[in-house]
Image (cartoon, rainbow, N blue to C red):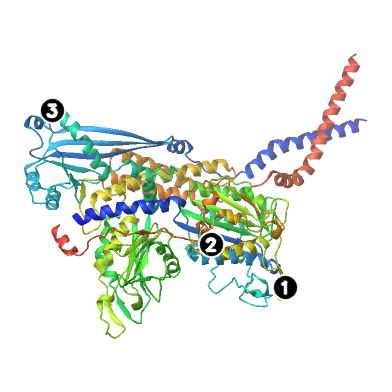
Amino acid sequence: MKNNYMYCVLFCLFYQNTAGQFFSSGHTNNWAVLVCTSRFWFNYRHVANSLSVYRSVKRLGIPDSHIVLMLADDMACNHRNPKPATVFSHKNMELNVYGDDVEVDYRGYEVTVENFLRVLTGRLPPSTPRSKRLLSDDRSNILIYLTGHGGNGFLKFQDSEEISNVELADAFEQMWQKRRYNELLFIIDTCQGASMYERFYSPNIMALASSQVGEDSLSHQPDLAIGVHLMDRYTFYLLEFLEDIHPASKANMNDLFKVCPKSQCVSTPGHRTDLFQRDPGSVLITDFFGSVRKVEITTEVVNLTNPIEQVDER
Amino acid sequence: MATAEVERQRGQLAALSIAAVVIIVGVPLWWKTTETYRAWLPVSQIRELAKLQLQLSADVEVVFARGTVTPEQQKKMPLTQTQEEDHAVDEDTALKYKYETKYRTATIMEEDALNKPNAAEADLSLHVLSESPCGSLVIYVIPESSSLLPEDVKVYIGQRRTALLRVPQMRTAKTLEQLLHHLQPHIKQVLRVMSFSRADITAALSDRVRFHPGNKESIADSMRAFKSSPGYEITFSLLNPDPKSHRLHWDIEGAAQTYIQPLLTKMSPVANFSIDSQTLHYAMLGVNPRFDNTRSAYMLNADSLAHVINPVEARLGSNAASSNPVLNFLLYVPDAYHSPLYIQDQNKREVPSNAFHSPRWGGIMVYNVDSYYGPETEFPVDININMAKVMGVFLAQLRLLLGVQSSPPPPGFLVAPCGSTGLADWELDRLMWSRSVENIATATTTITSLAQLLDQIGNIVINDNIAEQVSSAVTSLQLAVAELEAGNLKFALQFSKEAIQASEKAFFDPSLLHLLYFPDDQKFAIYIPLFLPMCVPILLSLIKIASEARQKRREKQAKKD
């Protein structure tokens, strides 16, 4: 009996320490939805964009089971790829972002506006496997990254359909109504990307875009051996920034807003934080890009050494 | 001249009849065919549910042992009182807590039971005498001089639904009312621990009420336990980084059956559970432990624990078929080089359980096997893991993650250890109260936001099956609220589970996808090429007819003059 009491006291003491950690961000798990919406070989750079964000997010700790990766076309096994099974992000083929443990959840023609909205709102047919679902809860921080060709108020999917900023804002509102996220970070790398986050109205959303309305986002460098542009500028510098982040890093969102200034990007990246409750300076990069688990020491133990005796007592 | 007149009249008649057909037949037909099918929803009932007013009722019995009441006070018993407490959480949610308290004196058999040497045995004999139904409580008031409880303890909470309360003698209490008034705060404190409390219920309502960070501990509690779900998957994993040195044997099937299954069976009204297990070889921790010379052992300090889980999680398998939340329990046996391995807390002290857990994920325990063999043994060594010790830790972590245990009891309280099932009856009741409230709150939020969504977006098709699900959810919700008021906890929980299943099914139905957003300029672009070529001749001929009629009238006027 005395031991039990002591355990209770120890438990009390621990509460003071761990409550402080919890209080700062309010999330217990991380999810990422990474979407590339363009097909055809000359849009190689969009696939490379998504894959480099995928790579950073995995490196910082988010497991595959919590990443929904949607690639509208297959560049690694494309007939025109001179180096099959690779997707490079730096010229001279320095960094292969395809790797050997990529898990693509939606591929090719499965990447449609409908499927994207179904993943976000959770309205999938019951036969959909776990890996294709966004099983977030009210304590999940979600990173959503979109890249492709876009315009003022829309994003083009597969060269045949488009999603408008109103639909996207409605989808986020439905996610909020069902408490499917704690905080959301929305990054978009397309032409006139800032128009896509203009219509958001749900709380706890922070948005970044690679260019303002009326500006085009430009691609970075072509590789002469592969023959196409490998990356977009904004994501290239974003990748460079993320390579310096490690799971225990304390870099915050203000550093992320400074990525790719006009001198490097030619377009003006924009961001929107008015819907976000916390101050961006207190939000760690790893709150969205990594998966730092909260941990508590187990202080109490159930004494199970004599189960048979107690059963007889009854 | 006459034929021209006839021609003109025929032309006018044709134009008028075409216009008539277009307006009378065409417009309603177009309206009907472009309408989306929307089945009827009980909107008024849903709007009523938006204002959540719950009443939680519990039956409490307070039994006075010999020596706590005077004979004249005894004459007034048995006495029944009802206490109600209002708790307004926010403008849309109001709760009422109702306690029906019955006061009586102890029977002779109960007196015998209370004369046992210690509290645990007394608790057992009291339970044998009478079993309290789900949701109710019995508090036995014992005299100050009783030796059942140790010196500094005033309340003992048993394994079932009984509590022993020792109250200092009140000499000035003459009437029963004064005595009851004196006892009231103590009884309230016991009820707050054993039954529903404001903090628990407010935490359960976190879906509806996004309460602002006031109480840090309550936030940590609400973040740790899994949200209410109809089922959970429990996975036990054995991590063996060094199969060359250790050949591990663990009887996981037997251990799960003996130690874990009783708890899960007891919790079956709350949720369904499924257990599976796996063994992973060559699974390293991903963090390098430091060697501590003072203890001659490897230490893992608390800060590095957060980075242990991710590399391991990538390799864990899970059941792909269900979308239920997964609880992972990992047993890590350190490799021979890094043995023994201990976990250190913030104050650099060794943790006795050698285990840690992560909220809404699971737990990890480090099991050292260096004591099983000496330095001269031949590798690999066969090792049988002591499952009782391991399961004791996992059971404690499971209780925390399922939300069974939240805050430590107030001072002066002694809580009995939870017994072989790992769960006391009153803990189960408390969990059932908060789960019922959570389910009802979540289901009402889902249904009201679904109704709002369908109202806002006029283009979504509402099929019959969705309307059916919504109606059944509304019915189950009303029943659940009624059962909570009546105090039937089991039925309330069952109805609340049905309500939440129906509401989730309706909300997440794949047919409710809104892909019908048309900006105004696109609507014009579609309709103009279809209707303009048809409408222009009709309009022009109508205008011509009208102007000719006006001209004729003017001529007639002129002729009259």
Return the residue nearer the eye: A83 or B242: B242
Circle 3 crowding by C-alpha within 10 Å: few under 14, some 14–19, many from 20: some
Direction front: furthest residue? B294
Mark 3 lies on a secondary structure that is loop
> Which residue bears the numbered disc 2?
A68
Relative image position of residue A13 (x, y in whole percent)? 31, 52
Return the residue nearer the eye: A75 or A188: A188
Is residue B305 in view?
A: yes
Give the position of the N terminus of chain B as an image quadrant: top right
Marks 3 and 1, how far apart at CA: 98 Å
Is residue B404 in view?
A: no
Relative image position of residue B146 (x, y in whole percent)? 9, 44
> Which residue bears the numbered disc 3?
B175
| Residue A83 relative to residue B118: left or right | right
> Which residue bears the numbered disc 1?
A227
Q: Are marks 2 and 3 on the same chain?
A: no
The image quarter in which residue A6 lies? bottom left
Relative image position of residue B142 (x, y in whole percent)? 12, 41
Relative image position of residue B236 (x, y in whole percent)? 34, 67
Circle 1 crowding by C-alpha within 10 Å: few under 14, some 14–19, many from 20: some
Q: Are marks 1 and 2 in contact (CB under 8 Å)?
A: no
Q: Amino acid at mark 3?
A: Thr
Q: Amino acid at mark 1?
A: Gly
Q: Residue at x 59, y 58 (%)?
A: A145
